[in-house]
Image (cartoon, grey):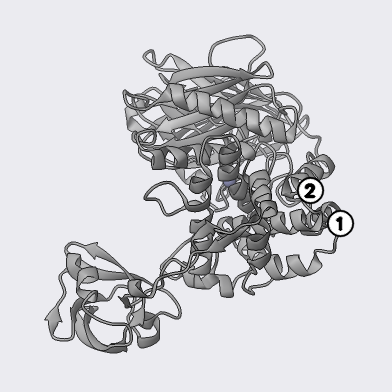
Amino acid sequence: MDHLPDGVVQYTVRFPEPWTHYAVIEATMPVSPGAQEAEVFMAVWTPGSYLIREYARHVEAVVVTDGTGRGLPFGKSRKNRWRIRTDGAEKIHFSYRLYCREMSVRTNWVEDSFALLNGAPSFVTLVGGQHLPHEVRLVLPDVWKYSASGLAASADGLAHCYTAPDYDTLVDSPLLAGNPVVRKFEVDGIPHYLVNQGEEAGWDGERATADLRTIVERYRLMWGPLPYEKYVFLNLITESGGGLEHANSVCMMTNRWSTSTRKAYLSWLSLASHEYLHVWNVKRLRPVELGPFDYENENPTRSLWVAEGITDYYAPLMLRRAGLSTQQEYLTGSEGSGGGLSGVIHTLQTTPGRLVHSAEQASLDAWIKLYRPDENSANTTISYYTKGTVVGWLLDARIRKATDGAKSLDDVMLLAYARYSGEAGYTPEDFEAVAEEVAGVPLGEFFRRAVESTEELDYAEALEWFGLRFKAVSGAARKAWLGADTKVDNGRLVVSKVLRGTPAYVFGINVDDEILAIDEYRVRADQFAKRLENYRPGQQVSVLVARREKLLRVDMTLGEEPGKPWHLEVLPNASEEQKKNLLVWLG
Ligand SMILES: [Zn+2]
């Protein structure tokens, strides 16, 4: 067996023409003593984002030398690997140009004003050398003055030089360079940075910083001492969206209006709360399959409903507990959003995929379902974010009731963290056992039904414990309904989604059908909803559609538009005990 290489992997990253979206990277890597060959790879996916993305497709102009200018022969050995004949060299210099123009939290972007580099899509490393220290030196264009990362500054103190103890840490630490607006606050003496790339007048960075501090302090109260030496919120105001968690940083994307309205701001805070909770749930307390990562293949796990779903349960709940949102906003969303916990339950209960795909299956299939959505996704799967949130809530209620209010899901997360964080990781069975230990009652049937099966969830216990109910729908509001989602495409009214069980599904309206008329009367694209107001549920109609340019009539019976039966409200006659339970839960 070859000796593993010793030494350091070093990268120099330059942006000679950033407006062309290229970074030029030179990697210097040690060669194992006596080895005739070395192999270099680039990751095919980014941890936290469960899709094979084939990052090597953005690599070009590879040149390999021994550091003295002598070229070394090399070739591709796999789609994402290069094999190099080292010919006695002690080091290899592997340089390449990297195209960086995908605006997302898990990929790269380079332009004239800034660069975002994520580890997985940027840095090749040695096969067998992931344990080595990895150092990055960014050479910035003169007009860029700042860089930020969760990585530690290199020991020599040079500007824009960072060091990672290993490849995993490098991959887990996105780098931002440019001229962001940076604000700092401390909790327990630990520095936290809000790094706003693209902040302009109107984006309220001062308020966001104050509220992030409140969030950090509230989580500190729940989890105990902060498990990092610094934390960086990279917040790219780039008219994009999403967030990706890291051990001591996060990359978020948002738009210039996200502090402008209450609804948008709560949504941004909730994203920050979600990503920040991952400091514990997933980055340190992780499913056993999610580490050490295999960067060249899928890493499926049955536990994303815990890792993402329970995180999504807590994200807005902790905003409420921290006083950043109201009880009403938590339960039903801010004005006009129709969201909150009610919105999540509504999404679950109106997604037919919940009846064919369990929370565990949805977790396992993230790589081929949630991350590869198509027009049939809602029929074939359920998001583990959505179902995990609701299961988290029901589990929380179950534990509170079983312990007469003495324990909650918080205690499950804390005990799991104490027992399985770090190298260990938990199996689904471990997590269930911890929940049972906290609840003090058997939970096998709960987990079988809520997590492993596609049976409908039972809300009765949670509603009763917290003194809540689903608001009744008034009969007067009932409207005729086709059941197909539509979009307006170049002035045409086109079917975009057909949910199982709806009239459209039953009678054969298809995705991509263009709806032209109901009975003998033309429907204009922007008048569809208004036209349906003239019909009653149960009425027979003939819908004229164009399908691949051919005109067809679909005879059908209109259904009844579902109201909002999943809208939570507090029982008007809630008991003192129920009021107390609600208060303890929501703070
Ligand atoms: Zn997440």
Asked if marks 1 and 2 touch (Cβ < 8 Å), the reply is yes
- Measured along the vertical axis of the image, is residue 564 above or below residue 96? below
Q: Residue at x 61, y 53 (%)?
A: 309
Q: Amino acid at mark 1?
A: Gly
Q: Nearer the viewer, residue 270 or 79?
A: 270
**Mark 2 surroundings: few (<14), some (14-19) or many (≥20) residues within 10 A:** some
- Judged left or right of residue 380, residue 318 is right
Q: How far apart, in angstroms, are the residues tagged by discs 1 and 2?
A: 10 Å
Tell me which label, 1 or 2, sits earlier in the chain.
2
Where residue 73 appears, as percent x and y from the top left, is: 58, 37
> Can residue 450 be seen in this snapshot?
yes
Pointer 1 local density, CA inside 10 Å: few below 14, some 14–19, many at least 20? few
Residue that label 2 marks: 407
Q: Is 497 positioned to the left or the right of 234 in the image?
A: left
Tell me where residue 397 appears, x and y as whole percent: 70, 56
Q: Looking at numbered disc 2 in the image, what kind of residue is underneath it?
A: Lys
Q: Mark 1 highlights which residue?
A: 440
For numbered disc 1, what is the local secondary structure?
loop
SS assignment at label 2: loop
Query: From the viewer's perspective, is residue 337 above or below residue 31?
Result: below
